[in-house]
Amino acid sequence: MALLQIAEPGLSAEPHKHRLAVGIDLGTTNSLVATVRNGIAVCLADESGRTMLPSAVRYLADGGIVVGSTALQAQALDPRNTVVSVKRFMGRGLKDVAHIEAVPYDFEDAPGMVRLRTVQGPKTPVEVSAEILRPLRLRAEASLGGELTGAVITVPAYFDDAQRQATKDAATLAGINVLRLLNEPTAAAVAYGLDNAAEGVYAVYDLGGGTFDLSILKLSRGVFEVLSTNGDAALGGDDFDHRLFCWMLDKACISPPDAADARRLQMKAREVKELLTSCEQAPVKVKLSSGEEVDLVITREDFAEMTRHLVQKTLAPVRKALRDAGLTVEDIKGVVMVGGATRMPHIQRAVAEYFRQEPLTNLDPDKVVALGAAMQANVLAGNRADEDDWLLLDVIPLSLGLETMGGLVERVVPRNSTLPIARAQEFTTFKDGQTAMAFHVVQGERELVSDCRSLARFELRGIPPMVAGAARIRVTFQVDADGLLSVSAREMSSGVEASVLVKPSYGLSDDEIAGMLRAGVEHAGDDMQARALREQQVEAGRVVEATEQALAKDGQLLNEQERAEIEAAIARLRALAQGQDHRAIKAGIDALARATDEFAARRMDNSIRAALAGQKVDEIEV
Amino acid sequence: MSIDLQQDYFALFGLPRRYRLDEAALEAVWHKLQAEVHPDRHAHLPDADKRRAMQWATRVNEGFRTLRKPLPRAQYLLELAGVDTGLETNTAMSPEFLMEQMEWREAVEEARVAAQVEELEQLHHRLQQHAREVLAELETTLDQARDYPAAADTVRRLMFIEKLQHEIDDALEALES
């Protein structure tokens, strides 16, 4: 990079620089990474040409870590150290995990989220997920030939705050800058909607390996508006496998199998399920550790019968989502099927019957989420082309509230509110001279705190002593576009300000994450300093470019002096970015951000004014 | 010179300050504004822009939510006019209305205990009809007569009806799961 860059005034130095951005579908069973190349979204393949990375991680005794199909193959051999379907444990405590008895792991209960004891010590689901994300990042960087600007990571729409935060942390741990957490059905709707120029109200039925989502979206002139979403964060293809597994145990009269046999039978169950998608019946042959052999046959009908209750279980969220959207099945123009589990014929039949129309299966249910995420990542990174003029308006899936007297929940943010959203509620003290107040933030639809998910507890201190009922404590919930919550509380009446900001967490502190990050980087043989420097240089380049584009477009909003100040801050940052001190570069980035704060405000006002221009009151008054 | 983040929602959406509203026009402006201010449009920009985008997008969503549905819109108009619609300060509802409410409530409770889904859905539907009739009064009292105390009374009645509808929703949901 030249020390002095010469560019025409009003022109950015690199006007059409393409930023490398990807979409990642971090799935229960398989994970994928996709990007937009020459305007077309494509899934990226590994060196052997496979796009799907099995979401399996094996920890070896020698400190090595194997991810993907190699790990999957070791399942029966080394079940305790080979983690599959880790997504089911994200942001979950021991008591939240279904069928825990059938999972061959050595769990350690920790506040908020379980840990798995492996040969390399206890691992959180966040760390395991990061191991899956890391090779996907490396695959993308190798394939695209450079460092990523960032990624859109998809999550089940029905994921709560703890599960979303855990996913974001896993990405950070894998060295990925998260541009946005995107709901899986919304990602699928984007891919489907843009490919088919769809308009109208659509339902997305998304049955993954471990999660079920149903979203209702209105597509109109480039706007994807989620009207409602519902689901079950603990229902997926895995449960269908589990039914088959139980059937095998029952038929073959196996009392609790050992860990290796359990794995063998589970793998067979998955295989049989997939076989029954195309065949009317399937053989079930498994050799057990004892030398005994299981030899059974199952028909498609038997399988449909034994899993009918699971299919029925998906229809309750469908009904609720329709009711929340104020719609009936007649209003639905099409049903988009997402997730490998929707290949099961009896699921397609049930969906067709319920919606009274054949579901749309003309897209690959395994890839559509990653492709949609890639399209959104491309736009978020700033590679917007004219045809990319679409907007996503998503919602929060579960209500947020506070605990009140008697263990009841006071709803503050109702489910299906369009994001971002902020809501405030006022509370008061109930004792004379009370100087502190405790808050308990929960998420869920039930009336009792004990039936909802606990997200955070915090205390507001320093309330000036007053008589009971005189203090006015305002608690504000802000949910951002990722669906992540932050809460603040402030005493209003006295002018004395006491405020607190909580990030709901599941027991992992920022320090712990920083520690894991260091360990991870060391493990990967990466140089932490070099990586930090590179990251800050990329960020500095990005910020400078963005600011210059803004100056070129809206420079007239500044007077000469203001413009000179911003240009000076740019020049300083440019010079710093040539150096080797990542902290100094960070400081330069922050300084430029402060220098452009007012400019950003004026530009925002200006764009709103432009949006409303010609929109005179009397024109609308018809 | 700067647009005030605190300006009222009608001004923010460039719509006349009144109860009668063209929902399609409101939605079109909502989309237009979000196309400018939504955080997705600013994700590649510095943190200062991102923060501002979130504040604006939050405000625009809150405005849309407030204006879209008749009851919150009426409440908001009364709030702008300085009229309190709070139930805590005004509990003097007419005896006829309270009697009617009690009858509705008993019917809902009976259907809930007997787990009569269809009956609950029927009640919901009838309440909806009833709410629509009451809402029709608002256009006259708010936009034409500008009789704010009368409008506030109607709003309070609607709040009762809405609460009852929520209770039916919750009962239906509980019966389904």
Image (cartoon, grey):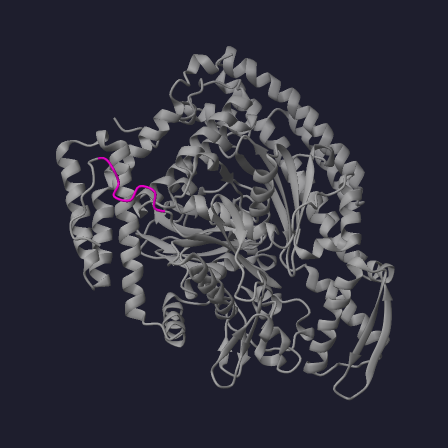
- Left or right, residue B39 beside residue A341: left
Q: In which quarter of the image is residue A452?
A: bottom right
Whole-percent x and y of residue A408? 57, 53
Identify the residue shown where x is 75% and y is 81%.
A256
Identify the residue shown where x is 87% and y is 59%.
A301
Whole-percent x and y of residue A493? 32, 43
Whole-percent x and y of residue A525? 37, 75
Q: In which quarter of the image is residue A244?
A: bottom right
Q: Is the magenta stretch mostly helix, strand or loop?
A: loop
Q: Which of B57 and B131 is in front in this view?
A: B57
Vertical comparison of A219 with A447: above or below: above
Identify the residue shown where x is 54% and y is 64%.
A90
Q: Can residue A183 be seen in this view?
A: no
Identify the residue shown where x is 68% and y is 24%.
B130
| Quarter occupied by the N terminus of chain A | bottom left
- Most extreme residue toward the bottom is A290
- Left or right, residue A121 beside residue A492: right
Q: Can residue A203 be seen in this view?
A: yes
Confirm whether the magenta stretch covers residue A56: no
Vertical comparison of A182 with A531: above or below: above
Which span is picked out in magenta?
A10-17
Whole-percent x and y of residue A49? 57, 63
Vertical comparison of A460 with B8: above or below: below
What is the count of numbered marks?
0
Q: Nearer the viewer, residue A321 or A413?
A: A321
